[in-house]
């Protein structure tokens, strides 16, 4: 024990952290807070963005979806780049890009400019996220201190998820929607010089070449597949060039990426880990859980504002119980996992989340606050239980020498599940919503076509029509949206039950890992902290 403590102290001196490591933690938490808030702050602003920029259904999906998709696509690329050229250097560059992209987003005068700015924010987020965790592990070599640091880090992430909608609602009450992005700039202006002064620089061992080509292939392939799904959801024919080409090209690039990784001596992603049933099952559970949640959260924000006519701030308050319940689940996650094991815990979490989603099908055109509160609390608790058990199982199943790669895969699967969930469930929502506006009395075909893009546009068309036809269109649009919401909830419940079946492949009992030389495998407390922070990004 004394040898371990001495080695940890020596490692602290070598990294340059010393007594300043807790100050370093504060700087890293500010970084995480920015990424976590930005993942959720836009949700309550979507109706305002729709009213101002009038994006189409596909553009609206891209405005929200592009950030997590770009971020997920580039996590591995920038994580490995940081190992090569320095993690602090990549982190500071991410700060600068995040600030510039925030300014562009705040001043965007069209949906296309906002989409491009959100894509740049995703690039900045991909630079920040892996670098913060790498530096944190470096400056806290003592495992007990590092567990405490990761716990603080995860708490900040959960606070970011809760603060995002509330902060967005407050800003929308007093300013225009672009203000939700301007709040990033002062923090970036402070973080850049402070980070340069206090954060230590570090690099990896540099073993093997850096496969940037493989990372770009994976990013382009994922973009193609999701774009094809979006086109299908927007009403494009399955065999049209705008749908078939992105799907085929994306699938081809992903297939080529897998073959490339299998042939390389030093692959960017070691695909052999997926041959382990528990590992591949855990990754699948993470994707399904996030796929079901994030799209629902976006649709719920629109339902609360456009159907129930709540203010953005009131919408943020209504969504707050979801995050609070998730934080509570994180606090008891380790005890539940030790008692019931990964299989029971993840399966029960999926079932509880599915029950919450089915409960929410009781939502109608009128407010039902007790039902919403019950549904959101069950949803937050069930989802966090699911993610916690899946992450712990994944990290424990990965070989000790590949713990870093396993963590990167988990983070990427989380982000991809969130991005694809918005696209898939948003497409389901649009497909169920549009038919309800095909034949409204007194409304022309052109006006109906415009109203089918989104509920916000339907309200605009109704306002222009006025009188009886306008009121009829408004009523039909609200009814069609609620119907689409119910269909989307049922599809989400089906995905969650599929996840419960998938979770039956997980181990019955929890197995605690040990640390190999030079490689830290998170123990139960660290796994709890890392799993808890995932709820923040619902985004």
Image (cartoon, grey):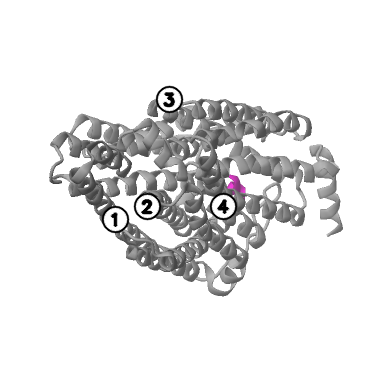
Q: Earlier in the sequence, mark 3 or mark 2?
A: 3
Which SS class for mark 3? loop
Q: Specify the principal SS of the magenta part.
A: helix
- Mark number for residue 300? none
Q: CA distance from mark 4 to mark 2?
A: 19 Å
Disc 1 marks which residue? 482
Whether residue 266 is visible: no
Q: Earlier in the sequence, mark 4 or mark 2?
A: 4
Disc 3 marks which residue? 109
Which SS class for mark 2? helix
Which residues are drawn in magenta?
A: 400-405
- Mark number for residue 303? 2
Q: In the image, what residue occupies the spot 56% across and 60% down? A: 324
Q: Earlier in the sequence, mark 1 or mark 4?
A: 4
Q: CA distance from mark 3 to mark 1?
A: 30 Å
Residues marked 4 and 2 touching at CB (< 8 Å): no
Residues marked 1 and 2 touching at CB (< 8 Å): yes
Residues marked 3 and 4 touching at CB (< 8 Å): no
Rendered location of residue 242, percent (x, y)? 24, 30
Q: In the image, what residue occupies the spot 18% across and 44% down? A: 469
Q: In the image, what residue occupies the spot 86% across and 57% down? A: 2
Q: Is residue 308 above or below residue 187?
A: below
Residues marked 1 and 4 touching at CB (< 8 Å): no
Whether residue 162 is visible: yes
């Amino acid at each position: 024990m004394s040898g371990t403590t001495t080695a940890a102290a020596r490692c602290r001196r070598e990294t340059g952290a010393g007594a300043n490591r807790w100050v370093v933690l504060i700087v890293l938490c500010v970084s995480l807070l920015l990424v976590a808030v930005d993942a959720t702050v836009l949700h309550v602003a979507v109706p305002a963005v729709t009213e101002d920029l009038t994006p189409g259904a596909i553009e609206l999906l891209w405005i929200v979806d592009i950030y997590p998709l770009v971020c997920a696509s580039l996590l591995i690329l920038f994580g490995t780049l940081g190992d090569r050229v320095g993690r602090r250097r990549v982190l500071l560059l991410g700060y600068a890009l995040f600030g510039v992209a925030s300014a562009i987003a705040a001043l965007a005068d069209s949906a296309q400019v906002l989409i491009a700015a959100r894509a740049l924010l995703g690039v900045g987020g991909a630079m920040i996220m892996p670098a913060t965790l790498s530096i944190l592990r470096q400056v806290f070599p003592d495992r007990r201190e590092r567990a405490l640091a990761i716990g603080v880090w995860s708490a900040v992430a959960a606070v970011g998820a809760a603060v995002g909608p509330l902060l967005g609602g407050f800003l929308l009450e007093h300013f225009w929607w672009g203000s939700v992005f301007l709040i990033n700039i002062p923090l970036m202006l402070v973080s850049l010089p402070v980070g340069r002064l206090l954060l230590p620089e570090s690099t990896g061992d540099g073993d093997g070449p850096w496969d940037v080509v493989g990372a770009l292939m994976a990013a382009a392939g994922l973009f193609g597949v999701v774009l094809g799904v979006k086109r299908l959801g927007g009403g494009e024919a399955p065999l049209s060039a705008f749908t078939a080409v992105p799907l085929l090209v994306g699938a081809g690039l992903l297939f080529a990426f897998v073959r490339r990784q299998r042939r390389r001596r030093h692959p960017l992603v070691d695909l052999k880990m997926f041959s382990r049933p528990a590992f591949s099952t855990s990754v699948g559970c993470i994707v399904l859980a996030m796929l079901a949640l994030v799209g629902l959260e976006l649709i719920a924000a629109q339902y609360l504002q456009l159907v129930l006519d709540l203010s953005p701030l009131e919408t943020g308050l209504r969504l707050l119980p979801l995050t609070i319940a998730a934080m509570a689940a994180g606090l008891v996650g380790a005890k539940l996992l030790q008692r019931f094991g990964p299989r029971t815990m993840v399966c029960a979490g999926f079932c509880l989340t599915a029950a919450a989603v089915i409960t929410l099908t009781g939502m109608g055109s009128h407010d039902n606050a007790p039902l919403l509160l019950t549904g959101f609390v069950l949803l937050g608790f069930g989802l966090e239980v699911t993610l916690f058990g899946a992450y712990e199982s994944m990290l424990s199943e990965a070989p000790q020498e590949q713990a870093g790669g396993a963590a990167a895969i988990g983070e990427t699967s989380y982000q991809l599940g969130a991005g694809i969930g918005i696209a898939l469930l948003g497409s389901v929502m649009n497909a169920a919503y549009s038919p309800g506006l095909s034949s409204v009395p007194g409304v022309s075909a052109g006006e109906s076509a415009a109203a089918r893009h989104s509920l916000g546009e339907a309200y605009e068309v109704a306002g222009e029509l006025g009188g009886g036809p306008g009121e009829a269109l408004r009523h039909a649009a609200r009814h069609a949206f609620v119907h689409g919401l119910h269909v989307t909830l049922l599809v989400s419940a089906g995905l969650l039950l599929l996840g419960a079946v998938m979770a039956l492949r997980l181990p019955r009992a929890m197995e605690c890992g040990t640390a190999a030389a030079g490689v830290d495998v998170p123990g139960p407390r660290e796994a709890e902290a890392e799993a808890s922070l995932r709820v923040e990004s619902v985004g």
